[in-house]
């Protein structure tokens, strides 16, 4: 196993034709910027990319973006992406979105015939 890159809380190693990206304890916006840098630099001759979340304790919505970015870049090169040791279900349990908003209802707060615009009521989940 060769250490290709270690940047902040992410370790990238290569063994034969496999690239392993080992995430740190938190996967967030900082990690997204780090992963973007790593995937730009190391899109080399590996056949598959392994994402290791074994020590990750939580993932925020930017972390999900980071994982999707890796997936898109790897698949664009016709490589295989997989989780280490069946961690897909575990990753979903780690997700912590910053804040999620949804429109519950659209309620006219004024008479629509008076020319006032309808306003939307948002509820935080």
Image (cartoon, helix red, strand yellow):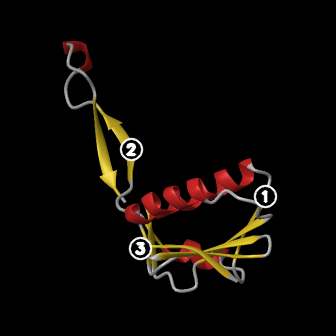
Looking at the image, residue 103 sits to the left or right of residue 78; the answer is left
Q: What percent of the width, then of the height, locates residue 5?
A: 55, 72
Few, some or many residues within 10 Å of mark 3 (<14, 14–19, 20+): few
- 3 or 1: mark nearer the eye: 3
Looking at the image, residue 97 sits to the left or right of residue 70; the answer is left
Mark 1 falls on what kind of element? loop
Q: What percent of the width, then of the height, locates residue 2?
A: 66, 80
In primary-sequence order, the first of circles 3 and 1 is 3
**Image point 38% across, 46% down: which residue?**
104
- 2 or 3: mark nearer the eye: 3
Location of mark 3 (residue): 8
Residue 68, image quadrant: bottom right
Residue 65 showing in the rendered view: no
**Image point 44% across, 65% down: which residue?**
31
Location of mark 2 (residue): 103
Q: What percent of the width, then of the height, locates residue 74?
A: 70, 56
**Image point 62% across, 60% down: which residue?**
42
The mark tally for this picture is: 3
Mark 3 falls on what kind of element? loop
Q: What percent of the width, then of the height, locates residue 85?
A: 71, 84
């Amino acid at each position: 196993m060769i250490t290709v890159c270690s940047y902040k809380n992410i370790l990238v190693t290569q063994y034969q034709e496999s690239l392993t990206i080992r995430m740190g304890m938190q996967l967030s916006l900082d990690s997204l910027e780090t992963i973007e840098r790593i995937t730009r630099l190391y899109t080399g001759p590996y056949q598959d990319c392994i994402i290791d979340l074994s020590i990750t304790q939580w993932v925020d919505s930017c972390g999900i973006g980071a994982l999707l970015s890796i997936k898109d870049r790897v698949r664009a090169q016709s490589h295989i992406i997989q989780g280490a040791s069946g961690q897909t279900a575990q990753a979903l349990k780690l997700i912590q979105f910053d804040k999620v908003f949804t429109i519950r209802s659209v309620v006219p707060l004024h008479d629509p015939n008076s020319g006032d615009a309808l306003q939307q009521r948002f509820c935080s989940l």
